Image (spheres, helix red, strand yellow):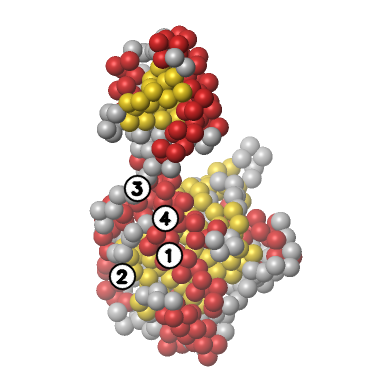
Amino acid sequence: MSTFTAPKGTYDLIPPTSAAFLAVRDALAAPLRAAGYGYVETPGFEDVELFARGVGESTDIVTKEMYTLTTKGGSELALRPEGTASVLRAALEANLHKAGNLPVKLWYSGSYYRYERPQKGRYRHFSQVGAEAIGTEDPALDAELILLADQAYRSLGLTGFRILLNSLGDRECRPAYRAALQDFLRGLDLDEETRRRIEINPLRVLDDKRAEVQAQLAGAPLLRDHLCEACRAYHAEVRELLTAQGVAFEDDPRLVRGLDYYTRTTFEFVHDGLGAQSAVGGGGRYDGLSEMIGGPALPSVGWALGVDRTVLALEAEGITLDVPPVTSVYAVPLGEEARKVLFAVVADLRRAGIATDFAYGGRGVKSAMKSAHRSGAWFALVAGGRDLADGVVQLKNMESGEQEPVALDAVVDKLRSRLG
């Protein structure tokens, strides 16, 4: 009988690699926690209609990439392909916007699912850290989120990423641009499916990654030439606030995010060391999304940063994170009496916040010390009958090999001071 393997396009996170992923998640979330964002967690699946309305029925995500299922009760559900629609749904359902403290600031972390052609940096199951600021229209909020993402990436030591910035206009100025873009696109040599997209959401055509389509888009009208005065002023302030904080960005008049709900500020973080899958994160303002999914008007802005892509970016720059070992101390008992005594010492060390492991299985000292080395522990605690008769255990420095006796009742304090 053959063993099972992970589904195509997915992966398992196992030690020691998983430690780097956890460190990246923590680093991406840390600036958010320091800026007043509270944690939210939503189900891994939602009503299909939430994404059809929110993400957009003409997007590849909804038409081609969404995993859907029918429940025994006949409900149509989808594994979440992105986080924003779910988080906004949760905030509306809990009436967080009525608590009187806007914007509602939320951050989240989790797995998302899209049926895509698997390749390096693009999986069918991927991990993101995201942030949403719900209920306030303010260029300072857009700038804050971009700044927080910039801080998160830099805290990991990344320098090879770029921030692309654009404005997609709003319901006042977008219609005129949409009409101009449709006129341009109708004159191109495009396949039938893309031609249908022109009528539903022409901006999605600009996001088409195929070289034969991109080659024809060189003369396409630019949104920045059609922005109303309010959108121009709003975008100018976002740029000004970022510049004042020393955040470097590139104006990209052709930047269009692949989701229908974006308005005004849109941005993407790209890393040139990742090849075709260069985007490591992105987001923007989505002032109309709440109304699209049945809520009140709640102007909002947010982003999602890919944990998988960020790990690849670290590898591309040759950055190895300084991840502390899982185990700081490894206890090796010699004999049954020592096993019981050291088991109690291990429990005391763990209660004191010191990561400690134990040589289980009654192995010999040689085998147990090999395990101690493999664990990455800084120190080993070794004790036999003679040590216990003297009321001590042997504390061994795993790096230098130096060993000293320590009184049983002083082990916790000794290791606290040694481990800092």
User: Can you tell which of label 1 and label 3 is closer to the viewer?
Assistant: 3
Closer-to-camera residue (252/70): 252
The type of residue carrying mark 2 is Val
Q: Identify the residue at image location x=48%, y=22%.
A: 408
Q: Please identify, in this view, whether the residue under mark 3 or under mark 4 is nearer the observer.
A: 3
- Tell me how far mark 2 sits from mark 1, CA to CA: 35 Å
Q: What's the residue at 50%, 48% (across, down)?
A: 110
Q: Residue 214 occupies which quadrant of the picture?
A: bottom left
Disc 2 crowd rating (10 Å Cα; few below 14, some 14-19, many 20+) is some
Q: What residue appears at the point 37 percent right and 30 percent down from the top-left corner?
A: 379
Residue identified by numbered label 4: 306
Q: Which mark is residue 121?
A: none
- Of the image marks 3 and 4, the number of the one nearer the N terminus: 4
The residue that label 1 is drawn on is: 151
Q: Which residue is mark 2?
A: 213
Task: Report whether residue 375 is seen.
Answer: no
What amino acid type should be assigned to the residue bearing mark 3? Asp
| Labels 1 & 4 near each other (Cβ < 8 A) | no
